Amino acid sequence: MKTISRNSIISLFLLTSIVSYYYSCTQLEEQQLDTPSSYPNPSLKAQPNILWIVAEDLSSYIPAFGDSTVVTPNLDRLAKSGVCYDNFYSPHPVCAPARASIITGMYANSIGASHMRTGPWYAGAATAETISKYNELQPDGLEAYEAVPPAEVKMFTEYLRAAGYYCTNNSKEDYQMIKTPTAWDDSSNEAHWRNRPKDAPFFSVFNLMVTHESKIWAKANDSLLVDTNMEVPIPPYLPDTEIAKNDIRRMYSNILEMDAQVGEILHQLESDGLLDNTIVFWYTDHGGPLPRQKRLLYESGLEVPAIVRFPNEQLAGQRDDRLISFVDLAPTMLSQAGIQPPKHMQGQAFLGKYARQNEPEYLFAASDRFDEYTDRVRSVRDRRYKYIQYLMPEQPMYADIAYRNQMPIMQELKRLQASGKLTPEQALWFRESKPTEELFDLENDPHELNNLAEVPKYADKLKELRSACNELKTALDDTGLIPEKELIARFKPNGIQPQTAQPVIQKNDNLTAITCTTEGASIGYKLYHKSENPDQMSWSVYTKPFAISEGQELQVIAQRMGYQLSEIEVYAL
C-alpha cells in the first residue's frame, strides 16, 4: 500500500481501468489495466497560436456529426480540414460549472463551483445593484458568492501569459468566480488576437451566444433562416406538435447563424495569414438547448461536438473516438504550448508535448442546484454504458425551472402532461420520484429511455460503474455534496469574503521582487514610464524579480481566486 495525493487518485481513475480500490484516508491500493494511447499527435512548432470558437448550448446537430437537417458550410469546411472528436463531453450540463472546469482543469464539484450559479459573474465583476437583484431571486438563505478553489488552482491562461502568450476572451466568462487580473490580456467585446504585440503567439477565445437556450424564445419573432415548414427530427422525449417543431426549427436557424459567425472569424484568421500557423478549436459548452437536454446528465446534456484543425491540415478528415472531458482542455492547451501541466489539474492533456500515454476508461459528470431548484446527481460512463446516481431520489425527476419555462416547447410539454397526453417516453421525465440508479446501453438506447439497473444480466456492469462513481466522489472530496449554505459559510467566514493581502515590493540590489502572504495569490504588475497611461495596460504575470529603470513606475496587485482583490500598490524609482 502506498500513500498518494487526492489528485493522484483522480488521475489514476481517469487514466486506467480500475479493477479494485481500497481507501484508508488518502491511501489507495489498486490493480490497474493500462489502455495505451495509439492516437496520432500532430507535429507543432514552438508556441503555436491557438483559437477557440465556443458555441453555446448545442448537441451534435450539424452534418459533420451525422445530422444533415441543415447545411453548415463553414463547420463542414473546418471538419474536412481537421479532426472530429466523437466522444467529447462536458462534466457538467450547464454553463457556469462547465466553464469553471474549462478554465481550471478541475471538476467544478471539486472546487465548490458546481451550483448554477454562484453569482452574476458571467461578465466579470458585478455592480452592487446587480448582486442585490441576483440575491432576490435565490432560494431562501442563499446569496451571491464566489467559489474558492484550493490555493494551487489558477486560471490556466495565466500559465500561457507567463510563457509569452497574448490571451484574449470575447467575451462571456461565467467562471463561478471573478477572473483574476492576471487571467487575460483582454476580456471584453473588443478582445481579439489582432491587438497583440508584434509576433507574440496568441490564445484567443470567441464565445458565440446565438445558439443559447434563451435564443429559442428571444428570437421567436425574428425571420427564420430555414423553411417555416421544414421537417425536423424530433427525439422521442419531445412532443411531435407544431409548437415543438417551431422551436426546433428556431434551433436549426440559430445554428446557421452561428455557422456564419464561425465563417467570419475563420475569414479574419485566413486574411491575416494565420490559418496555417494556428490550432483552431470549435466546440460547444454543453449539450443542447431543448427540454431534457441542458441541465440533465443524459447524453443530450453532456455530449458535445468538437472539431480541431491543426496547422497545415495535419490529420485532415480523421475522426477521434477517445473519451475526452472538458477537464482535459486546460492541460491540453498548456501541452500544445510546450508547457508541462501542473500536477494539481485533474484533467490530462490529449495533445501536445505532454499528451497522456494512456486513455481513460470512464468519464464522470455531476449536477447540483439549477437556479431555484436543488438536486444532486452523479454519473459515470464508459464506451458503451452510462450509470446515473440520484442522490435525492425522493424529488421529482423533472425540475420546474422558471427560466426554462419561457420556452414554448417546454410549455407544450407541461400542457400535454397536465392533460395526460404525454407518450410513455415523454412521461419518463415527469415521474414524481426518481430511481436511485439508472443504467443505459448507449449503443442500443442512445436516448436513454430503458433503464437496465434492475435487469440481472447487467448486474456486474451496474456494480462496476456504481463503484467507480462512488470512489471518484470520495477522491474529489465532492463539494456538491455539502449543503450549499455550509459551502457559502466555508467560503465567506462570518459572511465576509476573504481579502487578498497587500503585495509587498522589495528592492534588492538592481532587482525588484514582489511577494504576497496570501497562499495561492496571483501577482500582477504594470511597469511603465510616466508618459504612459497604466490604465490602458493589462497586468503582466509576475514570475521572478526584474529590473526597473530610472524614470519608470510600477503598479502591483494580487488576488487569490475567490478572494477580494488587494489594493493597487505603486512604486516609483
Image: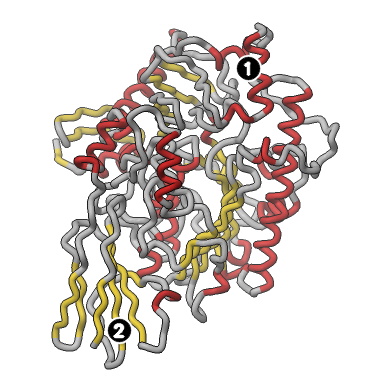
Seen in the picture, residue 467 relative to 294 is either above or below; the reply is above
Query: Badge 1: how crowded within 10 Å, few (<14), some, or many (20+)?
Result: some
Name the residue located 45 percent from the left edge and 71 percent from the top edge: 46
The amino acid sitting under disc 1 is Lys
Q: Estimate the spatial distance between the alpha carbons at disc 1 and disc 2, rounded to whole Å.
A: 63 Å
Name the residue located 77 percent from the left edge and 37 percent from the top edge: 69
Name the residue located 56 percent from the left edge and 40 percent from the top edge: 304
Q: Quadrant of the N terminus?
A: top left
Residue 70 image offset from top left, x and y in percent: 77, 41
User: Does residue 362 show up?
Assistant: no
Question: Which of the labelled discs sits on residue 178, or is there none?
Answer: none
The reply to whether the C-beta atoms of the residues labelled 1 and 2 are less than 8 Å apart is no
Q: Secondary structure at mark 1?
A: helix
Question: Which of the labelled discs sits on residue 414, or is there none?
Answer: 1
Q: Quadrant of the C terminus?
A: bottom left
Q: How many marks?
A: 2
Residue at image mark 2: 553
Q: In the visual, does 229 lie left or right of 72?
A: right
The amino acid sitting under disc 2 is Glu
Residue 505 image offset from top left, x and y in percent: 19, 75
Looking at the picture, tell me which residue is in the foreground, 565 or 239.
Answer: 565
Looking at the picture, tell me which residue is in the foreground, 278 or 436.
Answer: 436
> Residue 124 falls in which quadrant of the image?
bottom left
User: Does residue 320 show up?
Assistant: yes
Residue 238 image offset from top left, x and y in percent: 66, 22
Q: Earlier in the sequence, mark 1 or mark 2?
A: 1
Q: In the visual, does 347 lie left or right of 351?
A: left
Seen in the picture, residue 250 relative to 561 is either above or below; the reply is above
Seen in the picture, residue 63 relative to 450 is either above or below; the reply is below
Residue 186 image offset from top left, x and y in percent: 47, 66
Seen in the picture, residue 477 relative to 344 is either above or below; the reply is above
